[in-house]
């Protein structure tokens, strides 16, 4: 990332999955003038051991203990992303907090929106399509409202603001998310506990598909947008959808190799009425906007994604499996 070393940077969610990866990426480029904002616990502390930063501040203290106008760059990744998040918490922690953080700061503002705001069909990040989205969960509604606040008040024209609609992420640093971690991570943890079965749910014989994206690609794409001084909301996905069944096949085959035992995939047919109303059956990033801005092409193929999943499982096995 091309930023001045003198620029003071704030990373909210700095001990979490994506935030801690931003921290390490900044450290690699020689930048350590960084303050983290997060609720610290015994799990997410592991993500920042060995990283360089100035301080960690609780979100409860951020508005009365630091001057936000001192920061030239704010990377706002903190949120309550759980599907069980109450409406009140989603609005307070995700919308109201984000809005106040934005209004009390003045530097470049990079924040995590979410691909969950799309619902099932439209995955276009063009502002003209915004009012056709169908956010389903409390989390996605809170993200939708903050996007709307920035769009309708034309903030993208007056201040460098970058919104990142991140699709289904997986990779190093997600362990503290618990049940909200990726299918790859939770399948590995189940394997550690002796479970040899991966469950794939179907509804009317339909298996959902997702745009799965590796953490390294997420950081790379957002860095390119920052370096090119882009302002606006962009999809951060591969533009490639893989079914849960194919995803599970790759995971089970690699788990069999790592653990030396057979893993099987079980398809479970469930009634539509029992499916969580927030469930998305299909996501695939429309990358026309980001590809045009950065002169990119969709490069993800089945083999590339398969290699990333396998590399991640090898990392998990080295990190957890041999202990």
Image (cartoon, helix red, strand yellow):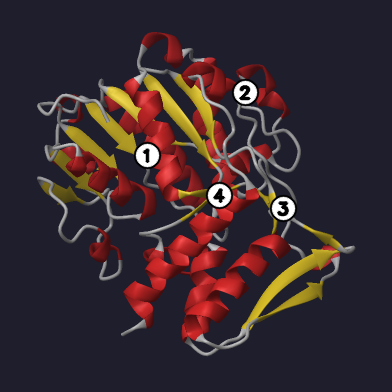
Residue assigned mark 4: 304
Between disc 1 and disc 4, the foreground one is: 4
Residue assigned mark 2: 288
- Which residue is located at x 67 percent, y 40 percent? 284
Which quadrant of the figure has residue 230? top left
Residue assigned mark 3: 209
Q: Residue furthest right?
A: 204
Whole-Å distance between the Cαs marked 3 and 1? Answer: 32 Å
Which quadrant of the figure has residue 73? top left
Q: Is residue 309 placed above or below 79 in the rendered structure?
A: below
- Which residue is located at x 38 percent, y 67 percent? 315
Upstream in sequence: badge 1 or badge 2: 1
**Spot occupied by residue 67 in the image (x, y as percentages of width and height):** 15, 31
Most foreground residue, 87 or 58: 58
Secondary structure at badge 4 equals: helix
Q: Is residue 159 placed above or below 218 in the rendered structure?
A: above
The answer to the question of whether label 1 and label 4 lie on touching residues, with beta carbons closer than 8 A, is no
Upstream in sequence: badge 3 or badge 1: 1
Neighbourhood count class around disc 3 (C-alpha, 10 Å): few under 14, some 14–19, many 20 upward? some
**In the visual, does 96 lie left or right of 245?**
left
**In the visual, does 107 lie left or right of 79?**
left
Question: In which quadrant of the rendered image does the N terminus lie?
Answer: top left
Residue 97 — which label? 1
Question: In which quadrant of the rendered image does the C terminus lie?
Answer: bottom left
Between disc 3 and disc 4, the foreground one is: 4
Whole-Å distance between the Cαs marked 1 and 4? Answer: 37 Å
Whole-Å distance between the Cαs marked 3 and 4? Answer: 17 Å
**Spot occupied by residue 16 in the image (x, y as percentages of width and height):** 34, 55
- Which residue is located at x 18 percent, y 43 percent? 27
Secondary structure at badge 2 equals: helix
């Amino acid at each position: 990332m091309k930023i001045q070393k003198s620029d003071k940077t704030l990373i909210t969610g700095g001990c979490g999955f994506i935030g801690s990866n931003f921290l390490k990426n900044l450290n690699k480029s020689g930048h350590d003038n960084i303050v983290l904002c997060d609720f610290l616990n015994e799990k997410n502390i592991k993500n920042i051991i060995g990283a360089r930063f100035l301080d960690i501040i609780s979100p409860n203290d951020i508005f009365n203990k630091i001057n936000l106008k001192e920061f030239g760059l704010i990377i706002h990744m903190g949120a309550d992303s759980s599907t069980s998040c109450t409406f009140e918490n989603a609005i307070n922690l995700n919308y109201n907090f984000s809005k106040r953080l934005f209004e009390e700061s003045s530097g470049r503002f990079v924040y995590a929106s979410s691909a969950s705001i799309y619902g099932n069909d439209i995955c276009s990040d063009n502002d003209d399509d915004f009012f056709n989205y169908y956010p389903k969960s409390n989390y996605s509604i809170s993200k939708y409202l903050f996007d709307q606040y920035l769009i309708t008040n034309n903030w993208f024209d007056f201040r460098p603001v970058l919104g990142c609609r991140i699709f289904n992420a997986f990779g190093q640093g997600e362990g503290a998310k618990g049940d909200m971690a990726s299918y790859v991570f939770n399948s590995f943890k189940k394997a550690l506990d002796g479970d040899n079965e991966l469950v794939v749910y179907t509804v009317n014989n339909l298996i959902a598909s997702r745009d799965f994206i590796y953490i390294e690609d997420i950081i790379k794409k957002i860095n390119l947008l920052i370096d090119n001084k882009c302002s606006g909301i962009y999809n951060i996905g591969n533009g490639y959808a893989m079914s849960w069944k194919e995803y599970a096949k790759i995971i089970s085959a690699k788990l069999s190799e790592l653990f030396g035992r057979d893993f099987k995939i079980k398809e479970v047919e469930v009634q539509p009425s029992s499916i969580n109303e927030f469930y998305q059956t299909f996501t695939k990033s429309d990358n026309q906007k980001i590809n045009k801005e950065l002169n990119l092409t969709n490069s993800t193929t089945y083999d590339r994604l398969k290699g990333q999943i396998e590399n991640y499982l090898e990392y998990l096995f080295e990190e957890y499996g041999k202990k």
